[in-house]
């Protein structure tokens, strides 16, 4: 039988095999090429998914951390229902809870650090622990070798650096900085010790007290310095903080006496850019600026506004030469890089300076700790939290023979009517009926829309002492006399319980011909001179120049520097303000641990004043740098153990060990320089936090029991700037800054 | 003994040719099938590869957007509904093209950059990234910087007209989606509402009220695009509706898909069109 094919021949079989193999190779190559591309694409997609997952994790982590702080406020307070919005007032209980609890172990040498995510944190209730694992973000690399170096953790330069001179190249923190531990996240949320198989990602964080720093969008004045010197010496806004008090060119951590000062050059370059249009600054060359004295004064007038909140730059003018309005630092990264690249290296801030300045601050301009309770006729107490502070500028309307438009304002804001026949004022309360209304016999407790005298008496009332109507009106009249430019003593009629008319007198330095004795006593001016502003007051601390017959001090003025049971004046600091904008930027937390921030605010404040022949204040001598540093250090030592609840605690702080003596004078006026410097600038009601969060998506190695076997898929980092109102427990404002590395 | 060689018979040849033909047909079909699958997959990958970095770029631009009430935006509002393809322009803290190339990029970071997304006349998605110098910087000078207010005469659209025009040319525009022919966006407000026009004028834009921006795009892979004329692309883009309330967040893509399903254009071309939507939290 014949064979059907010729494949019996070896060469023919080989050819067939080659053809078949060629087909197979061709097909295989096609399929492999496709799968290779598909696999690469899948990996790219997985990477993008990992980044997305990390972003969601980071945002969730920030929500968790902020939620923990809000819970700390609620748990650490005595909640008081109110009839306003927000509906609950969280009164700190105990007082120490007015500040966020610090992780002492982590923050001992780092003034700005509040806490980090750490396995064994020292937080106790009401603070909420971090839920961190024992896996450290720096010391325990991930399965694929990822770790967060301490330099990265200090990219924001808020932690003191071992070598401040390297701020612009390597922000390595001081060795005592302990990097955060990872918080592992499962589908059920963050948990300290999850099953590795359930882990979907992790995050670590550190929280800093940005509210205790100088906001560079408000702080700092140009060169030439605003003139006259009273613009700086009278303080009143953080703009006039003398930033030369900040540490510079020093290996010491913030808080230590700087070895040399921050130069005016750097400040001038920053302010020249920030207030470019207001100053009509001309580059000479950029970033140095030529600023005229006139425009420097315009700068001062801008920041002495009684209504601007400084959260946005001024757009009142435009600099056509530089094609610019005023500017703001939109992020901390922008501030750091402006300093790093735009300021000449010889004058740029170093790391320790950067640890004292921020770019975000918000504060509600309302009193902190008092809740006027108004009883209805049925005996029910209604709580009216004061919604704002009384504007000092209103005092300008208290002018004899007021115009008709001012008449209504005076009655509403002061409860006063002008009695032209007697050439004096009559206190009739804002609700007094008639023209003129009969003189009031008493002052009702303040509710909504309280007048000046209501607030003044409420401020000076305690559970055991209620100032009389006459005493209250006399102090108010003395404040009016400090404010108005005339030399005529302010007189205010009121009535006693029988309806008889009495008169309360203010105090002018040169008007010594007032009646005295009998039923209408007028105070006798203090001997030896009585300094008078006779001009608009700059900040509530300057109320301390007003005469008070009941003052325990030798100068018989309101007392903002002693802490005794018979001193009823300090609470005045909390109820009045130079600027009513709310919320506003630029306020500094009085409980800051950053001593040099307070030193900058205090430095240059007029410690003593000089007067002319008529006893009008015409100048002053500022607090020296060494005194400012000492005072600031003593204040931090006091608030570390007994944090301030409100501005009223400035007097307690002034009376604390070391604070009064550090100012270098025992004169009441000198001691009160602290209240004048801090009273208008500081706050206690805002937790201004910078939350630094790094989140990583990924999963643990299969079948592992070790959380360090975590493979990172994606990573995201944010700096969340957030301002939380301590007394209402809500977020005032926040800014999310993505960190690009 | 010498072996005798025999030739194939005619029957053997016919059978062999028939079998070979059959095998070739089978292999050809197989190759075609494999090619079709790989082509379809490749088209999808091509489009995905183009869209992924585009969306990532947008994510960075939106995340770094300067969200303030005192800076200019050029966005969709009730008085500027942007029928058809949309345009959005805003300031963002991202890298961009700097007017002075002699300055190192690192020196400028982070910097304010004018970002704009638009569909050009060739139905391609373009992105402008024009970096601004710090205010008053002398080199280069004079160059507009970030203006707050926004002040009349110094708004984003008055200072950077190309950023808010779908036709004006500018060297800082680059094609970032060569095959994107439809671009639409709308807002997810913090109130929970979905809106296309929460504001009535450009000076009222409050981006802080916006929780996220949703972006929807239609993309055609390059090989499918060759099957369509520019007129076909125009017709297709114009038949895809704008987002309009009350439409669910997935309603826009559903409407676009129905347009594709009912289109009479060549199916191979339509099969290369992909629809995407991504929500960018602000």
Image: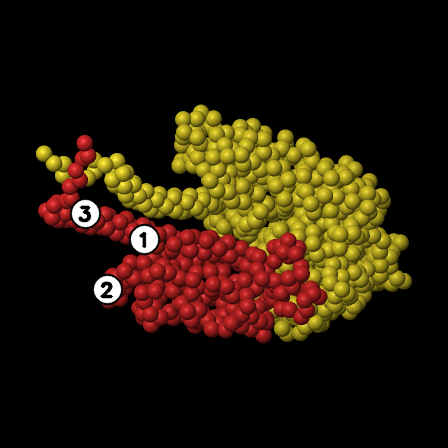
Chain colours: A yellow, B red
Could you tell whether B95 is left or right of B277 in the image?
Answer: right
Could you tell whether A578 is left or right of B251 in the image?
Answer: right
Q: Mark 3 points at which residue?
A: B20
Q: Position of residue B281 (x, y in %)?
A: 46, 53
Query: Marks 1 and 2: CB-CB under 8 Å?
Result: no
What is the C-alpha distance between the residues marked 3 and 2?
Answer: 43 Å
Chain name for mark 2: B
What is the C-alpha distance between the residues marked 1 and 2?
Answer: 24 Å
Do the residues at discs 1 and 2 belong to one chain?
yes
The quadrant of the picture occupied by the N terminus of chain A is top left
Task: Say few, some or many: other residues with alpha carbon within 10 Å of mark 3 (under 14 / 14 to 19 / 20 or more).
Answer: few
Question: Residue A258 versus residue B124: which sits nearer the camera?
Answer: B124
- Whichever of labels 1 and 3 marks the residue nearer the N terminus, that label is 3
The residue at the point 85 percent across, 44 percent down is A665
Question: Residue A54 versus residue A681: which sits nearer the camera?
Answer: A54
Do the residues at discs 1 and 3 belong to one chain?
yes
- Whichever of labels 3 and 2 marks the residue nearer the N terminus, that label is 3
> In the rendered image of this protein, does residue A179 appear above or below residue B186?
above
The residue at the point 41 percent across, 29 percent down is A702
Local secondary structure at mark 1? helix
Could you tell whether A438 is left or right of A248 in the image?
Answer: left
Q: Where is residue B268 in the image (x, y as percent from the top left)?
A: 27, 60
Task: State whether residue A706 appears in this view.
Answer: yes
Q: Mark 2 points at which residue?
A: B262
Q: Position of residue A482 (x, y in %)?
A: 77, 60
Q: Name the residue under label 1.
A: B39
Furthest residue toward front: B1
The residue at the point 38 percent across, 70 percent down is B83
Q: Position of residue A100 (x, y in %)?
A: 59, 39
């Amino acid at each position: 039988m014949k064979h059907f094919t010729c494949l019996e021949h070896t060469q023919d079989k080989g050819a067939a095999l080659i053809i078949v193999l060629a087909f197979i190779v061709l097909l295989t190559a096609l399929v492999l090429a496709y799968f290779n591309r598909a696999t690469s694409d899948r990996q790219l997609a997985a990477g993008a998914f990992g980044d997305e997952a990390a972003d969601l994790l980071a945002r969730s982590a920030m929500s968790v951390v902020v939620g923990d702080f809000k819970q700390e406020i609620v748990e650490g307070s005595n909640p008081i229902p109110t009839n306003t919005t927000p509906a609950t007032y969280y009164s700190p209980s105990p007082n120490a809870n007015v500040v966020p609890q610090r992780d002492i172990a982590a923050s001992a040498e780092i003034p700005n650090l509040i806490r980090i995510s750490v396995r064994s944190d020292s937080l106790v209730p009401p603070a909420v622990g971090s839920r961190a694992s024992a896996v450290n973000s720096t010391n325990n690399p991930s399965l694929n070798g990822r770790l967060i170096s301490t330099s990265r953790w200090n990219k924001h330069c808020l932690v003191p650096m071992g070598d401040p001179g390297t701020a612009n190249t390597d922000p390595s923190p001081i060795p005592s900085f302990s990097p955060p531990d990872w918080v592992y996240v499962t589908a059920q949320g963050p948990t300290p010790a999850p099953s590795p198989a359930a882990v979907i990602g992790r995050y670590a964080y550190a929280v800093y007290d940005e509210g205790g720093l100088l906001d560079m969008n408000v702080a700092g004045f140009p060169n030439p310095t605003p003139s006259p010197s009273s613009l700086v010496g009278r303080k009143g806004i953080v703009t006039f903080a003398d930033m030369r008090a900040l540490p510079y060119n020093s290996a010491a951590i913030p808080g230590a006496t700087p070895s040399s000062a921050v130069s005016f050059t750097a400040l001038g370059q920053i302010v020249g850019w920030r207030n470019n249009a207001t100053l009509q600054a001309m580059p000479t060359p950029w970033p140095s600026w030529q600023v005229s004295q006139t425009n420097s004064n315009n700068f001062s007038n801008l920041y002495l506004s009684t209504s601007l909140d400084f959260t946005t730059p001024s757009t009142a003018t435009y600099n056509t030469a530089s094609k610019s309005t005023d500017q703001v630092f939109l992020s901390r990264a922008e501030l750091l890089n402006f300093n790093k690249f735009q300021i000449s290296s010889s004058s740029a801030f170093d790391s320790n300076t950067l640890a004292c300045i921020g770019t975000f601050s918000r504060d509600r301009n309302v009193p902190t700790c008092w809740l006027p309770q108004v009883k209805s006729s049925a005996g029910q107490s209604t709580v009216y939290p004061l919604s704002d502070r009384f504007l000092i500028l209103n005092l300008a309307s208290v002018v004899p023979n007021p115009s008709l438009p001012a008449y209504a304002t005076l009655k509403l804001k002061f409860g006063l009517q002008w009695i032209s026949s007697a050439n004096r004022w009559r206190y009739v309360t804002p609700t007094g009926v008639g023209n003129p209304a009969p003189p009031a016999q008493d002052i009702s407790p303040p509710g909504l829309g309280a007048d000046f005298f209501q607030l003044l008496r409420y401020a000076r009332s305690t559970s055991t002492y209620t100032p009389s109507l006459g005493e209250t009106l006399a102090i108010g009249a003395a404040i009016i006399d400090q404010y108005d430019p005339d030399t005529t003593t302010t007189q205010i009629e009121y009535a006693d319980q029988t309806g008889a008319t009495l008169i309360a007198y203010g105090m002018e330095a040169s008007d010594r011909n007032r009646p005295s004795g009998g039923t209408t006593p007028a105070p006798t001016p203090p001997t030896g001179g009585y300094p008078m502003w006779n001009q608009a007051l700059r900040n509530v601390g300057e109320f301390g120049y007003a005469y008070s017959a009941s003052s325990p001090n030798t100068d018989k003025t309101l007392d903002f520097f002693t802490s005794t049971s018979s001193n009823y004046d300090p609470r005045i600091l909390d109820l009045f303000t130079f600027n009513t904008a709310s919320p506003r930027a630029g306020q500094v937390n009085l409980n800051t641990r950053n001593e040099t921030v307070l030193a900058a605010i205090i430095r240059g404040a007029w410690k003593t004043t000089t007067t002319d022949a008529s006893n009008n204040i015409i100048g002053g001598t500022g607090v020296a740098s060494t005194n400012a540093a000492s005072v600031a250090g003593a204040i931090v030592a006091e608030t570390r153990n007994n944090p301030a609840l409100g501005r009223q605690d400035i007097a307690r702080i002034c009376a604390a060990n070391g604070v009064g003596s550090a100012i270098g004078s025992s004169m009441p006026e000198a001691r009160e320089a602290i209240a004048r410097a801090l009273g208008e600038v500081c706050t206690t009601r805002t937790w201004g936090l910078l939350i630094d969060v790094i989140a990583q998506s990924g999963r643990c190695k299969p079948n592992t029991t070790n959380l360090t076997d975590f493979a990172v898929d994606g990573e995201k980092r944010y700096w969340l700037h957030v301002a939380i109102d301590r007394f209402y427990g809500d977020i005032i404002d926040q800014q999310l800054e993505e960190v690009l590395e | 003994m010498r072996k005798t060689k025999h030739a194939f018979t005619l029957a053997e040849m016919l059978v062999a040719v028939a079998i070979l033909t059959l095998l070739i047909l089978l292999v050809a079909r197989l190759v075609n099938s494999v090619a079709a699958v790989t082509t379809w997959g490749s088209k999808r990958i091509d489009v995905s590869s183009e869209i992924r970095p585009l969306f990532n770029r947008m994510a960075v631009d939106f995340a770094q957007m300067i969200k303030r009430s005192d800076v200019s935006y050029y966005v969709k509002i009730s008085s500027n509904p942007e029928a058809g393809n949309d345009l959005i322009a805003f300031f963002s803290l991202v890298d961009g093209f700097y007017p002075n190339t002699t300055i190192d990029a690192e020196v400028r970071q982070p910097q304010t950059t004018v970002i704009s997304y638009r569909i050009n006349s060739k139905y391609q998605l373009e992105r402008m990234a024009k970096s601004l110098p710090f205010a008053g910087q002398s080199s280069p000078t004079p160059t507009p910087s970030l203006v707050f207010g926004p002040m009349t005469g110094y708004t984003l659209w008055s200072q950077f007209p190309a950023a808010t025009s779908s036709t004006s040319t500018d060297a800082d525009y680059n094609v970032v989606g060569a095959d994107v022919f439809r671009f639409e966006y709308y807002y997810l407000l913090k109130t929970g509402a979905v809106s296309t026009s929460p504001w009535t004028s450009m000076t009222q834009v409050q981006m802080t009220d916006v929780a996220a921006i949703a972006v929807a795009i239609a993309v055609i892979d390059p090989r499918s695009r060759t099957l369509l004329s520019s007129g076909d692309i125009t017709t297709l883009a114009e038949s895809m509706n704008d987002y309009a309330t009350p439409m669910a967040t997935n309603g826009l893509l559903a409407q676009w898909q129905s347009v594709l399903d009912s289109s009479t254009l060549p199916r191979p071309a339509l099969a290369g069109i992909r629809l995407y939507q991504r929500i960018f939290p602000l």
